Structure formats: structure tokens, C-alpha cells
Image (spheres, rainbow, N blue to C red):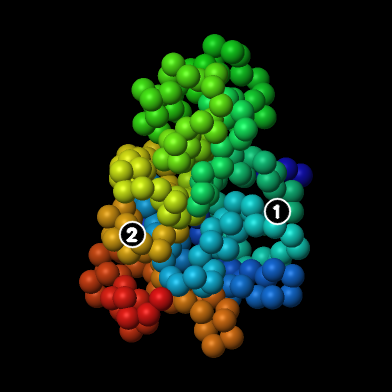
Amino acid sequence: MTIDLNLNNQKITDSKPIVPAIDIENVSFYYGTKKALEGVTFKIPQHQVTAMIGSSGCGKSTLLKALNRIGELEGKVKVTGKVEFFGQDIYKKGVNINTLRRQIGMVFQRPNPFPATIYDNVAYGVRIFGGTSKIKLDEIVESALQEAALWDEVKDNLRKSALGLSGGQQQRLCIARALAVKPKVLLMDEPCSALDPISTLKVEELIHKFKEQLTIVIVTHNMQQATRVSDYTAFFNTDETRVGRLIEFDSTEKIFSNASEQATRDYVAGRFG
């Protein structure tokens, strides 16, 4: 049976006034027999920006890919524990993965526009689900490009190849493509690492704007960026066996000014990583 992921119910934790969009409970992740993450538990607050920080190889991007099951495209993987999206276990048998990935969109580290027109890039996901008229599709494409602050730059060139755009424009196009299907959560895996400072600023401005309508989870190695854009921060590190673990999760202000764990304080101060 396919589970309907289009739910509006909310759950509030007993310990904190957080309304989670995603509830991660004791999650471990394996690539084949190799364990990449162990025992991760925290709640991603709704309509907030959550940053995931930590040194390379500590499992941040792995966890991000587990949140909409896109990690399964990389080969044989196993996930234990529970990931609940608005109260539903996304790894439960019968979940419609296409619907899940529509509800939980993703923007990758490097811009990955399709070798197609600007218009077709944005319209791609909408067309997959069908039932949209040409007039309505035109409206959706324009709205998504407007939301991604790209419309004014491309409105006269919608039928030209997306590959002709600059790197910053391509990344905003990928954001528009994700927004076109109206997700509830947007995952961003180092979305600015390949961009110049001006393009980075534009993406960060979009992040601030988007949290009014959806939940954002961003992986970043840039500590300044984490402090600029996020409300909450999760710090990851590897143990002696090189398995990734969540060390601390709290408000961004707390993590960067008065973290509870010494390892967190050392990392945000630049003493390792």
C-alpha cells in the first residue's frame, strides 16, 4: 500500500517547543557493510533553517541523502532506525519514493541542470506528475524562477539551453526546479561551495526568504555561512573507528557561542577540521 505523504499534522516534542518537519531517531547508515553513520537522533524544526556542520567524512551529506532516500541511488545501502516526515516513517514499506522526493527536494553541491532549455529544466518535475495544462505550467515556471530570483535574468531566453547560464545562475535554476513541485522541505548539500561571493550572497538571501514557506536543511563547511543563514545547527564528527556521529544539536547561537561539548567548541573555533 502506498502511503500518502501529503500530510499537515504536526507533532510537538515534550522537551522543547519544536515542531519537527523531520524526526530522526537512532539512525545508522551503511554503504554495503561499511557503517557511515551511527545512532543519529535529533529533530529538524519546521520553517527553520538547520545547518549540518563537521569535518569531511563525518556523515553530513550521507544523512542529508537519507532524508529523502536519494542515497539509495548510489548502490547497496542500509538504513536502520526511523526517519519520520510529518509523522510518517519514510522507510516503511509501501512509501511512494517519487512522492517523497517531491515533498523533500534537494539541491546539490555543484549545479546540475539538465542539457535542456531553461523552461524545460524548471518544468521537468511538474511534468512527471502530469495533469498540468500548458497555461498552468507557464505560470508555475515563471513563479519558480521568480522565487529563485532568476526570472528577470532569463525571461527572454527560456528556450535557450540552461548550460549557457553562469554557475550562479545554474544553481538558482536548480533551486527553481526544486521549488516548482512545491516541496515542504528543501535539502541543500553545500550549495554555495562552487560559487563566487556574489552568487553565494544571492543564494543565502533566497534561503532566508524560503523558510517562510518551507523547511531548509543545509550542509556547509563554511562556519560564517552557518551563522548567517541557520536557526539550528547539528555538529557531526567521527569516532575512533571513523564512523560519523552527531555530537551536538542546538540553536545556532548556542552552538557558536556556548556549545556544551568541547569538541564542538574546538571545531567552531577552528582548532580542528
Give how far across and how far down residue 143 sits, in percent: 43, 24
Q: Is residue 173 above or below residue 264?
A: above
* Image point (55%, 19%), residue name: 159
Which mark is on residue 16? none
Query: Which SS class for mark 2?
Result: helix
Quadrant location, the N terminus: top right
Q: Is residue 131 left or right of residue 238?
A: right
| Occupied quadrant, residue 148 | top left
* Image point (65%, 57%), residue name: 71
Q: Which residue is mark 2?
A: 226
Badge 1 crowding class, 10 Å Cα cut-off, few under 14, some 14 to 19, many 20 or more, is few
Give how far across and how far down residue 131 sits, in percent: 65, 20
Can residue 101 be seen at all in this image of the molecule?
yes
Q: Is residue 111 above or below residue 147?
A: below
Give how far across and how far down residue 16 sits, in percent: 35, 64
Label 2 vs label 1: CA separation?
Answer: 28 Å
Q: Which amino acid type corresponds to the residue marked 2 in the rendered image?
A: Ala
Quadrant location, the C terminus: bottom left
Give how far across and how far down residue 147 sits, in percent: 39, 31
Viewer-nearest residue: 56 or 100: 56
Can residue 17 be seen at all in this image of the molecule?
no
* Image point (54%, 58%), residue name: 64
Q: Is residue 122 left or right of residue 256?
A: right
Viewer-nearest residue: 106 or 116: 116
| Occupied quadrant, residue 4 | top right
Viewer-nearest residue: 112 or 93: 112
Q: Which amino acid type corresponds to the residue marked 1 in the rendered image?
A: Leu
Q: Which residue is mark 1?
A: 73
Residue farthest toward the left in the current orientation of the protein: 257
